[in-house]
Amino acid sequence: MDAEGLRRLIRDLESENIELKPSLSQMREIVESAAAFAGAKGGKIIVGVDDKGNVLGVQIGKDTIETLANKIRDNTDPVIYPGISVVEEKNKNVIVIGVKESHRKPVLAFNRPFKRVGKSTVRMNRDEYERTILEGHRDKLRFDSEICKEATLEDIDEEKVRWFLRKAKKERGFDVDPEICAEEALMRLKLLKGDKLTNSAVLLFGKQPQNLFLQDRIRCARFKGVTPIDFIDMKIIEGNLFDLLDATEKFILSHIRKAAKIVMFKREEAWEYPPDAIREAIVNALIHRDYWVSGNIRVGIYDDRVEITNPGELLEPLTPEMLKKEHESILRNPLLANAFS
C-alpha cells in the first residue's frame, strides 16, 4: 500500500472494515479486531493513527513486524496469517494490517469469539457463538434432515400423508400413488433416514409435533392500536406445518378488514391485505425459520400493519437489502421447502 492509499483509508476513519489504533501497546485489542474481521468480510487495522485520523506514527524496531505477526498467529483460532506493511506518512511510520475473511467461522482471539458491529469489535455471547458454529456446519447439521430419535411411525398422521399426496399429484403432478403406505410415502419424499423419521417428517405429518418440538407453535395476537400492549384477541396455534399455515391464515383474515365496491353492476370485495401475500409470508416463516432456536413464530395484527416474525437470522450471503430485489434462494430447511413447493 502506498501513502495515497493509506490517506484514503484514514479519511474514512473507522468503519465495519477499518480499525484505527494509536499504538502497538493495544496489542490485545489489535488481535481481537483481527479475529472479528476474519469472522466477517475481512478488513484492515491501521496502527499509528488515532480515532480522529491524526497520524501519530509507530516506532519500528528490528523485530516489530515479526513480533506483531506472531502475536496474531499465536492467539487466533483458526489461525490468521495477516498481511502487514509499513507506510510512511508525514515522516512517520504507520503499520497496516490486512486481514482476509476466514473460511471457518467464528474466529477466536485468546480463546474467545469476537465479531464486528458497526465500528466496534465486540465479544460474541454464547448463543451467537453456538449459532455461528451451527451455520458453518449447516450442510452437516441441518435441523430438517436430523433423525428424530423419539419418534416412530405411530406418531405420523397417515391421513395427512394421503391428503398431501393427493394434493401434490393434482397440483404438481407428483407421481406417487396417494394410497401407498405412509412409510413408503415418506421414503419417496426423502423424509426417512433408513427406517428412522427425520425432524421434517414429524413437523410435516406428525399427529402432535409439539410433543417433541415445543418451538413448533405460532403465537397470534390482535392488538388494539399500533403498539403490542393491549390485545383484543390471542391464540396459540399448534399442529403440523400445514395445519399451522391454514389456522394462522384464518386468524389473520378474521382480524383484517374487507371492503366492497360495485364494478360494472357487480359487487367486488377486496381484503385490506392480499390473502396470497399473507399466506406466502406464513409459508416463508414456517420453512425458513431456525428450528434450533426455541422461540415461536409470532403474528401481530395492528391497526396499521400485520407483522410476521420468525426465529433466526438471514443465511449468508443474504442481507435485508438483497431481499428487496431479485436474489438467489438460500434454504435453511430444504426438505421442508421441497414439501411445500
Image (cartoon, grey):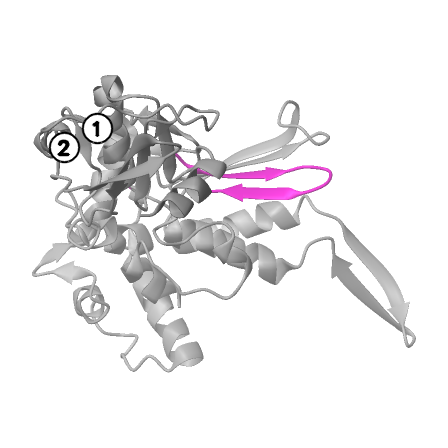
Query: Residue extending furthest front?
Result: 91
* In magenta segment, residue 294: yes
Q: Name the residue nearer the viewer: 67 or 148.
A: 67
Q: Where is the C terminus found, in terms of image quarters?
A: bottom left
Marks 2 and 1 sit apart, C-alpha to C-alpha, by 8 Å
The residue beneath circle 1 is 31
- On the image, the x and y values in percent for residue 164 come to 36, 67
Q: Range of the magenta residues?
A: 292-309
Q: Residues within 10 Å of mark 1 (few under 14, many from 20)?
A: many
| Residue 308 relative to residue 230: left or right | left
- Residue receiving disc 2: 76
| Label 1 secondary element | helix
Residue 90's quadrant in the figure?
top left
- Along the line of sight, the residue nearer the viewer: 332 or 187: 332
Identify the residue at image location x=29%, y=60%: 334
Q: Disc 2 vs disc 1: which is toward the camera?
A: 1
Q: Residue at x 50, y 66 (%)?
A: 326
Q: Nearer the viewer, residue 119 or 46?
A: 46
